[in-house]
Structures are given as C-alpha cells and as structure tokens.
Amino acid sequence: MKFGVSTFITDQGIRPAPLGRAVEERGFDSLLIAEHTHIPVERRSPYPGGGDLPEMYYRTLDPFVALSAAASVTERILLGTGIALVAQRDPIVTAKEVASLDLVSGGRAVFGVGVGWNREEMENHGADPTTRGRMVNERLRAMRELWTKEKAEFHGEFVDFDPVYSWPKPVQEPHPPIYVGGAEGAFPRIAELGDAWLANRTTPEKLAPKIEQLRSTAGRDVPVTVYAASDDAATVEGFRDLGVERLLLYLPTLPESESLKTLDQLAAVADRFR
C-alpha cells in the first residue's frame, strides 16, 4: 500500500513549495490538495463534516498554482487535486491547467474530481446544483477530447465547441489519471470516466461493502485511494487488508514548523506499513 498526504493549502499554513519538498523527503508518494474558489457569506448547505465550516475552507490557494510550485522543487511525488470542483470550472481552461501541471511536473499530475456539496458556491459560478452530476460528466468527456485530439470538438448539453487546437497535451498518455471522489452515487461516473475511486474520510468497515458495490457497477477492479485518512495504526492496517492502493494521511493546515513535525509523525506511521 502506498502512502501520500492530503491537506488544505491556505494563506495561513505552510507554503506549497516547502510542503512539497517535505512530503517527498519523507518518502510519501503523493500530495493531493483541496479546492474551494470562495465561500458565500450566506450559507444554506450544511457542512458534510457537521458543525461550523472550518476556516481552511475559506482560504484555499488555487490548486494548480500551488501544485505547480510544489512541482518545481520535487522530482518524484504525484501532485493532484482532491478534489477539483468541476461543476465550477470552465472545461477548456481546466483542461489546459491539468495538462500544464502534467508538463511542468514531468508527468506527475493526478486529476481528482468531484461534483461538490456547497450549492451556494456553485450557484455563484452559474452552475445548477440539480444538474451538476450530468454537467461534470460532460465536462470530463470534453476535457478528454481536448487532451487526446489535435483538433478537439465537442457538442453536448452543457459543453459545445467546434474543432479547436488546445496545447499543451499531457505528458501522460492518454491523459493524467482521473480520480473520482464521492459516495456510491459517483460509481457510474467512475465506471465510465474514472481511473480510481477517491474515497473521502471513511473507515475500513464502511469501505469494504462499497468496494464490492463499486466493482459490481464498474465491471472491473477499480483502484481505491482514501483521502484524509486517519493515521491510527489499526485503521491503517484495516485499509491495507482491504487492498486499498493508497492512503492519503491527513495533514491539518498549520504553520511550517508545526507542519513538518506533523509530517514526521505521519511518516513514522507510514514506515510501519511500507
């Protein structure tokens, strides 16, 4: 089982370059970071974690800027979004951002995607929460055309463009892996468009039946990465026994000195199971 780090990079915590360097130096294989463009002042959508929305949600850096900074000081780790809010993103611009990250990192980009939970946030982007699932699927299909075709063309319900040139193309072929976040409602999306399931804040007990359900829906064995995983040894062992491909241990958003100490602790846990 592989080990990576998941976190929110904000203006209050460790900067992306020293974070990326520290993650790689400690033997982790990946760094995936969260995205929120903004948080509306008047909120109706309940926070999935319960209670008040943590401050880090209000202050995230642009993920592709942050990951490019991390790419500039690393050579090995995968660099990805966990998750990019595709319903809030122009697909042509996003395709270029993902491909550019893949190019500057030497083929290390991971495109973690999801539909999002904050309805007010997506409404500010002109997205209809009731159709966001169909929109995300279509935008992902359009992005795959942009990544893989010299003259890309797409005509759909939400995305419509005549033949275009779009460079750079990704280094990875046919494109960077798409890690699909979400619960069982995302399983058809994974079956059609995903290379892996990005399961969020779960336990081995909850995950086990979902893996079987995903395999049944997809008709294949889908790799599983767990985002924001606990560093509890028994929990880590449970995920390993399930055959989880990668655990993204959760790093709280902290100043640099505290982040480095926490990464040391997470690395010690990972070393026990490598």
Image (spheres, rainbow, N blue to C red):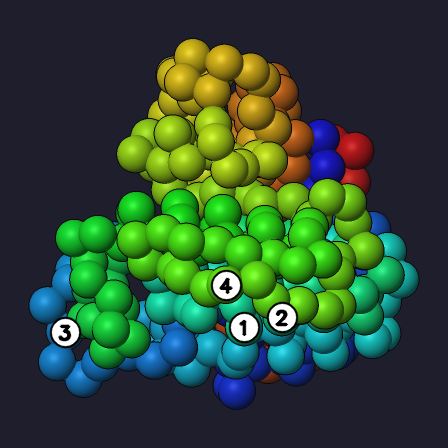
Amino acid type assigned to the residue bearing label 3 in the image: Arg
CA distance separating discs 4 and 1: 16 Å
Among numbered discs 3 and 2, the one appearing first in the sequence: 3
Which residue is found at the position 30% from the left and 46% from the top? 134
Q: Are marks 2 and 1 in contact (CB under 8 Å)?
A: yes
Q: Which marked residue is nearer to the observer: mark 3 or mark 2?
A: 2
Q: Is residue 255 above or below residue 178?
A: below
CA distance separating discs 3 and 2: 29 Å
Amino acid type assigned to the residue bearing label 2 in the image: Glu
Instruction: List the single residue furthest toward the right.
Output: 75
| Residue 209 location (% of width, % of height) | 38, 16
> Circle 4 sits on which residue?
162
Disc ID at residue 97: 2
CA distance separating discs 3 and 4: 38 Å
> Circle 1 sits on which residue?
93
Q: What secondary structure is found at the residue carrying circle 3?
A: loop
Among numbered discs 3 and 4, the one appearing first in the sequence: 3
Q: Are marks 2 and 4 in contact (CB under 8 Å)?
A: no
Amino acid type assigned to the residue bearing label 4 in the image: Asp
| Residue 194 location (% of width, % of height) | 53, 37
Quarter the N terminus occupies: top right
Q: How many neighbours does mark 3 have within 10 angstroms: few (below 14), some (14-19), or many (20 or more)?
A: few
Q: Is residue 250 visible?
A: no
Disc ID at residue 249: none
> Circle 3 sits on which residue?
43
Q: Is residue 108 above or below residue 191?
A: below
